[in-house]
Amino acid sequence: MTAKSVKELETVSKNVKPVVEAAIDEGAGCLRLSPNWVPRSFLHPGKRLKLHPDDLYAYGLDRGGIDERWFASTTEAANEGRVPDEGLSYVVFGDKRVLLRDAVEEAGAGIVGDAIWKKYKRWPVYSKFFDNMGPIPHHMHQNDEQAAKVGQDGKPESYYFPPQQNNVGNNFPYTFFGFCPGTTKAQVRKCLEDWNKGDNGILDLAQAYRLKVGTGWLVPPCILHAPGSLCTWEPQWGSDVFGMYQSLVEGREVPWSLLTKDVPPDKHQDLDYLVEQLDWEQNTDPNFKANHYLEPIPVADTASEGYMDLWIDYGRINDWQFVSAKELTVDPGVRVTVPDNGAYGLITVQGEGKINNLRLACPKLIRFHDLTEDEVFVTEAAAKAGVVYENTSATEPLVVLRYFGPEVNPDAPNVGDAAKQ
């Protein structure tokens, strides 16, 4: 049987190999994944995830509204009061499901490829839709050295604003990045001193940029950012560390604990340590936009063949490609084989069709326990052999976003290359 709801699935946690092998075989290297919803107690859902309005608080009002959907994730969400599998994606096969994390541990290089498996022993990245009604606090993500002090990984991330998820911009489609050039450490320290006085004024030191649908940004660790209200697709490293430096957002209190949750306990009140966590050169860069803003770049000139592949997230941090991403559009009635260098997670944002042996369909409305046909993980072997995409619609394009692991695409562009086109 094929289950139609998460409630109908049997969770397999032992002897997962037969299920994983059967799923890989059925999908010709493509694994069906089920929706992975994540709430945030301190944020206000933007209502563009296609989740049914009755299910926005499916985890309970005390857990907060669901404003994120995570894709191909083997990373746990760092939420207080979380359910045991929060943030973890499941592979679905028939009436069974297996954690993608368990599938990767079992099959290793057979799923993520030799290079990633040998170096990381896991799928080390994930992506998500991040969807809020308004802005979120000015915050940073620790680097590896800082995060290691609390047993975590650092977190670089990248952004893309899909047109299909942004029919409305909601309340504040502008993002603050870093500080105005010339901002001093003493000014930021004073903001932390003023935390309990109300708005601590951290945004008085920052610059906001208007967000443009169909573009993106590269955000290294230790850079402050207050994401605006566009629904954002975020390929990122497999970590959920952060520190929030803003005390009040749209009248909502930000607890001091969200500033220090990934800081060693003896540093929770050390204002100088908190200030020094920031990368001051990048936060005050007078050319910040030029060094972080991304415009789509065609992979090749294929429009005459009925499809277009675009680089949408790219660039390097300290000469390291931690992730890269593409947007594929296939015209109505077109069937095309697309090879790639490595494994990837995929989400369908428009249309319907097929990927190898699996159906793809972008849902219009999703209940909390629904199984969908919009998300897939593609193994490295399948990607390198070439995945067959077929648009079965007569009128609508098929559009999918796919993200890749570290150093998979050495031919990807660099930040700023779009301006040279």
Image (spheres, helix red, strand yellow):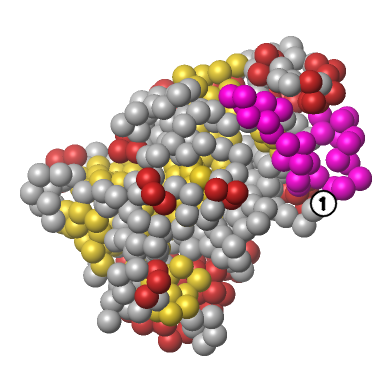
Q: Position of residue 247 (x, y in %)?
A: 71, 28
Mark 1 crowdedness (10 Å alpha carbons): few <14, some 14-19, many ≥20: few
Give me the residue at 53% from left, 62% from top: 88
Q: Position of residue 164 (x, y in %)?
A: 30, 38
In the foreground, 244 or 185: 244
Left or right position of 40 against 34: right
Q: Secondary structure at mark 1?
A: loop
Q: Is residue 50 visible?
A: yes
Residue name at image x 90 percent, y 35 percent? 270
Camera-nearest residue between 64 and 25: 64
The foreground one among 326 and 42 is 42
Stretch of the chain drawn in magenta: 247-275
**Above or below: residue 159 compared with residue 8:** above
Q: Quadrant of the C terminus?
A: top left
Q: Residue at x 37, y 40 (%)?
A: 48
Would residue 219 be found to the left or right of residue 29 on screen? right
Q: Nearer the viewer, residue 282 or 10?
A: 10
- At label 1, which amino acid type do we have? Lys
Would residue 258 be counted in the magenta stretch?
yes
Residue 378 position within the rendered picture, expressed as x and y whole percent measured from the top left? 38, 64
What residue is shown at x 47% (from left), y 32% (from top)? 133
Q: Which residue is mark 1?
A: 149
Vertical order, 273 against 289 (above or below): below
Could you say which quadrant of the image residue 32 lies in? Answer: bottom left
State whether residue 63 is above or below residue 99.
Answer: above
Name the residue at the left extreme: 394
Q: Is residue 16 left or right of residue 194?
A: left
Q: Is residue 408 visible?
A: no
> In x, y percent, where is residue 313?
45, 40
Is-magenta flag for residue 79?
no
